[in-house]
């Protein structure tokens, strides 16, 4: 069978996905909104062959571990079931996502895998169907099928058929700048999967998250629609702080921030007090992403670059959804 290569870009959530209602199907407790980023992506080639007895996974040129291979077999099993064929694949994946930049490569990785594997097995699925397959690799991957501003609908059904992402705005429709700030930090101890689970099960603040999430989503949707940067920035920063507050109310409590994380948050709030509109967001780790309008990109960059705890800064813009490549790279 023919080899197919697809590329998908990573994304950063403005309104976070935080908590699952179904661990197996990866169904979220709430909708989330993200921006797909232009600079960081995964390129994956998939080839199915009846000559194989199991899936083979090459990650950045090396044979992946058993655990990593099991993770990619999950969405591949769904695809095999769809076509009713028990045929295995070689998956060759290159991450142009510096994990050191504090970005997880799982979103771009599972989106690229869903796109390449479905085509390689002979399926012709639409973006919504691809989004549902990517979701079952890693939740946030369902948003990376699309470019620009994206919303993942949590859905109501328990079989997950109405839990998929959709594009809100094309990447060219609002050119914001996203600065990914890499800090001097230790590796994170609690993965998002475990962090979410503990929060949903034990956090005394989780009810507050659920009570206010629809309002955050509605404000963000309007702000994106109206290109109202102040409105969007205000709600995305509040939403990030609220997500992290839930971890402090968990049992046992945990925290993704380090000292440097808080220092950057203060620097951004001080910039705003001086009239420069920039806002921060933080995922399940210590690094900070700063969002601003293009006109302020340089001043924000220079302010952050001068700080002793900042190791590196990558500046991104809204990027594209999945694409198919004739040849890898
Ligand atoms: O998709 P996962 O399992 O990597 O979880 C992502 C969780 C957050 O990054 C914290 C929030 C989000 O919406 O991306």
Image: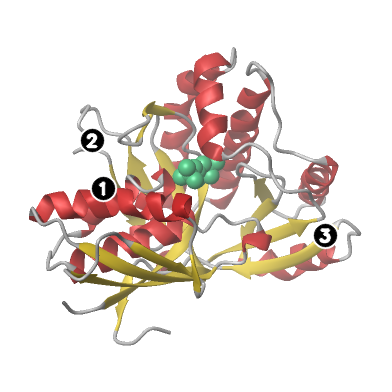
Q: Residue 160, which numbered label?
A: 2
Left or right: 308, with 112 as reference point:
right
Under tag 2, what secondary structure?
loop
Rendered location of residue 133, percent (x, y): 26, 50
Q: Residue 310, which numbered label?
A: 3
Of discs 3 and 1, which sits in the foreground? 1
How far, Cα to Cα, is label 3 from label 1? 37 Å
Under tag 1, what secondary structure?
helix
Which residue sits at x=43%, y=61%? 109
In depth, the one of 262 and 229 nearer the eye is 262
Which residue sits at x=67%, y=48%? 280
Q: Residue 132, which numbered label?
A: 1
**Disc 2 crowd, CA 10 A, few/some/many (<14, 14-19, 20+):** some
* Label 1 beta carbon within 8 A of ligand 1: no
Q: Residue furthest top?
A: 204
Q: Tell me, yes or no, if residue 62 can be seen here.
A: yes
Cβ–Cβ under 8 Å for marks 2 and 1: yes
Which residue sits at x=74%, y=70%? 298
Q: Quadrant of the C terminus?
A: bottom left
Mark 3 or mark 2: name the one nearer the start of the chain: 2
Rendered location of residue 66, percent (x, y): 45, 53
In depth, the one of 220 and 321 nearer the eye is 321
Mark 3 or mark 1: name the one nearer the start of the chain: 1
Rendered location of residue 195, percent (x, y): 57, 31
Left or right: 6, with 84 as reference point:
right
Cβ–Cβ under 8 Å for marks 3 and 2: no
Q: Residue furthest right?
A: 308
**223 over 69 or under it: above or below:** above
Under tag 3, what secondary structure?
strand
| Count of numbered labels shown in the rendering | 3
């Amino acid at each position: 069978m023919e080899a197919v290569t697809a590329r998908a870009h990573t994304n950063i959530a403005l309104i976070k996905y935080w908590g699952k209602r179904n661990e197996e199907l990866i169904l979220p407790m709430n909708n989330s909104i993200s921006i797909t980023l232009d600079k960081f992506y995964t390129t994956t080639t998939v080839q199915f062959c009846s000559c194989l007895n199991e899936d083979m996974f090459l990650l950045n040129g090396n044979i992946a571990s058993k655990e990593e291979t099991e993770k990619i077999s999950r969405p591949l099993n769904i695809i095999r079931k769809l076509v009713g064929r028990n045929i295995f694949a070689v998956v060759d994946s290159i991450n142009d996502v510096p994990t050191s930049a504090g970005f997880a490569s799982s979103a771009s990785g599972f989106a690229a895998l869903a796109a390449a594997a479905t085509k390689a097995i002979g399926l012709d699925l639409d973006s919504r169907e691809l989004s549902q397959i990517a979701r079952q690799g890693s939740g946030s991957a369902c948003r990376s099928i699309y470019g620009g501003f994206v919303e993942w609908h949590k859905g109501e059904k328990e079989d997950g058929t109405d839990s998929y992402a959709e594009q809100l705005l094309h990447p060219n429709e609002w050119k914001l700048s996203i600065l990914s700030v890499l800090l001097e930090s230790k590796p994170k101890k609690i993965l998002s999967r475990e962090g979410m689970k503990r929060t949903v099960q034990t956090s005394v603040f989780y009810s507050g998250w659920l009570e206010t999430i629809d309002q955050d989503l509605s404000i963000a949707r309007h702000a994106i629609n109206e290109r109202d940067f102040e409105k969007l920035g205000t709600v995305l920063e509040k939403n990030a702080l609220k997500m992290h507050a839930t971890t402090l109310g968990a049992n046992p409590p945990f925290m993704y921030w380090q000292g440097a994380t808080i220092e950057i948050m203060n620097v951004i709030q001080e910039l705003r007090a001086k009239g420069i509109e920039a806002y921060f967001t933080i995922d399940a780790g210590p690094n900070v992403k700063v969002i601003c309008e293009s006109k302020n990109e340089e001043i924000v960059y220079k302010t952050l670059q001068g700080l002793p705890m900042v190791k590196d800064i990558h500046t991104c813009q809204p990027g594209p959804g999945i694409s198919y490549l004739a040849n890898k790279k």
